[in-house]
Amino acid sequence: MLEGPLKYELLHKDKHSNARRGRIYTPNGIIETPVFMPVGTNGTVKALKNSDLKDIEAEIILGNAFHLFLRPGLEVLKNAGGLHKFMNWDRPILTDSGGFQVFSLRDRKISDEGVLFRSPLDGSKIMMTPELSMEIQMTIGSNIAMAFDECVEAGAERKYVEESVDRTFEWAKRSYKAHTKKDQALFGIVQGGFHEDLRDRSLKQITSIDFDGFALGGLSVGEHYSETERILKHSGPKLPEDKPRYIMGIGTPLIILMSVENGMDMFDCVLPTRMGRHGTAMTWEGKVNLKAGKWKYSTEPIDNKCDCYACQNHTRGYIHHLIRKDEILGKILLSIHNLRFLINFVKEVRKAIEEDRFLEFKEEFLSNPNNVY
Ligand SMILES: CNc1nc2cc(C(N)=O)ccc2[nH]1
Ligand SMILES: [Zn+2]
């Protein structure tokens, strides 16, 4: 029986690495971990209907507080009874706090109060604060909300990163205080850039607050994957073992494997759907650019190991044609395929962990240099 908004169950630890198999219980359903979470920024995973998401066995999707706040706005979401009802999705939803999006805007002004920026929609001035971010996420009614934090860019000066870590801690405390929705989990986010000592400082600060789960933020911000791995190795296994561990913005097979090896449970990324819309497929033999002329006459499926609708019903030649003609169906088929590929990939990762052969699985997959991306 689920007492609170979320329960994490550690089912098995791989004997030869920090990889772990678990299960997250929420009021909207169970999430098997490690899990890849499709991103549905505006209340839709681009190009997929809800039935497509269920066909590919998506167990949880993301929404974004910043975008949903701007449009359709809190009044519409309140009137609809929250995002689940608004989009008629009855499985778990996680919302990002909006921090990452706000920091991606050019003219934003950061202070201890929050971040002042101009709405990209109508130019009006908005002050995003931990309190407003919590109000937005509580109105959305996601199962998992994220504390409001500052995601620092990869090349930031150490002194700035240091100040930012302490600001993120103050914002984490304000987020926790403002978060009053008891049936919604709240995750804290550890920052610290690419400095191990600042990562330790942020970890100590953020884990001093009784969050329902913990995320590693400030990664996948343009750094080389060896830098991502360095921080993953340093911080991943130090996150509390009894709660879910989420690395934000991660979504290639390589970095998912690195993350799992270092104890992470949850990943999200726009890459599979974005790549799909632009004609690139993820396969068990690496990326395939279906825009390329060499696929014009192909009667093969995207990936003959894949069970998705696109691979079961269409050929590379047909999808090549659709992408070349910029047909909506091409974007739909490749988005379905790429998400199903990642969901199947992580399913195989879960099996490998259960059988204590995760490192062999990782080595075998990465032995094909086309899979290193
Ligand atoms: C796509 N990369 C990415 N890095 C992220 C970092 C954060 C964060 N809060 O540090 C959030 C979303 C992110 N997405
Ligand atoms: Zn497929």
Image: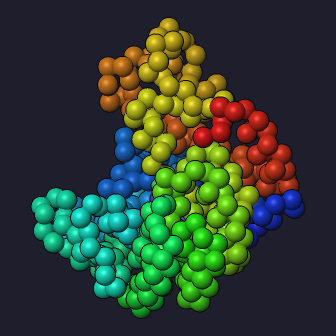
- The image quadrant that residue 170 belongs to is bottom left
Q: Residue 313: where, in percent of width, then height?
A: 51, 23
Of residues 12 and 172, the one nearer the viewer is 172
The quadrant of the picture occupied by the N terminus is bottom right
Q: Residue 301: where, in percent of width, then height?
A: 57, 21
Q: Residue at x 55, y 41 (%)?
A: 340
Q: Residue 179: where, in percent of width, then height?
A: 40, 85
Q: Residue at x 29, y 61 (%)?
A: 105
| In the image: residue 201, left or right of residue 337 | right
Q: Residue at x 32, y 25 (%)?
A: 327
Residue 124 to residue 221: above or below:
below
Residue 254 to residue 262: above or below:
above
Q: Is residue 261 visible?
A: yes
The quadrant of the picture occupied by the C terminus is top right
Of residues 229 and 196, the one nearer the viewer is 196
Residue 85 to residue 358: above or below:
below
| In the image: residue 75, left or right of residue 128 | left
Q: Is residue 183 visible?
A: no
The colour style of the image is rainbow
Of residues 275 and 50, the one nearer the viewer is 275
Q: Residue 214: where, in percent of width, then height?
A: 58, 74
